[in-house]
Image: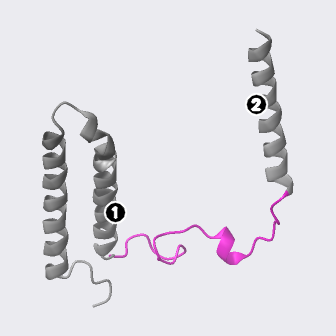
Amino acid sequence: MNLITTIISVATLLSVVLAMVSFWLPQMAPDHEKLSPYECGFDPVGSARLPFSLRFFLVAILFLLFDLEIALLLPLPWGDQSATPVFGFSWASAILTLLSLGLIYEWIQGGLEWAE
């Protein structure tokens, strides 16, 4: 019981110290740019009904797609210890092939070109 009490008290003390340091350490020098909200490259004081490019969404979807790829391929190094490692590696190869073909298609269609 003494070990658990020590661990909890050390964790609490460390959390309080880090929280206090985080309030004292940063230099507070706000300017106009830091106080304005980030609105995906648009002027935040303008009209909210302006048309915008769908390339913002395309980049976001591509980021999520390749982030999902990393999440799906993360257990791959431990796949060789399973009963059928060829099955796992074939699925990983299929995922990589499909995503590579999608990336090549986006590249050919010009979806990755930010400036026209």
* Residue type, mark 2 in image: Ala
Residue 79 lies in the magenta-colored region: no
Query: Residue visible at 19% across and 82% down?
Result: 110
**Quarter residue 30 falls in:** bottom right
**Quarter residue 88 falls in:** top left
Query: Is 96 on the left or on the right of 54, as rendered?
Result: left
Q: Nearer the viewer, residue 99 or 92?
A: 92
Point out residue 102 in the picture as x, y percentages from the top left corner.
Answer: 15, 66
Image vertical order of residue 44 relative to residue 73, above or below: below
Point out residue 90 in the picture as x, y percentages from the top left corner.
Answer: 13, 48
Task: Determine contact: label 2, label 1, CB under 8 Å.
Answer: no
Point out residue 42 in the picture as x, y percentages from the top left corner.
Answer: 47, 77
Q: Nearer the viewer, mark 2 or mark 1?
A: 2
Query: Residue visible at 34% across and 64% down?
Result: 60
Instruction: Provide the residue span drawn in magenta.
Output: 25-51
**Which image quarter is the N terminus in?**
top right
Q: CA distance from mark 2 to mark 1?
A: 36 Å
* Residue type, mark 1 in image: Phe
Q: Which residue is mark 2?
A: 11
Q: In this figure, what is the number of numbered marks?
A: 2
Q: Which residue is mark 1?
A: 63
Residue placed furthest toward the bottom: 116
In this picture the colour scheme is one colour
State the SS at label 2: helix
Query: Residue visible at 84% across and 58% down?
Result: 25
**Which image quarter is the C terminus in?**
bottom left
Q: Pointer 1: residues within 10 angstroms few (<14), some, or many (20+)?
A: few
Image vertical order of residue 78 relative to residue 104, above or below: above
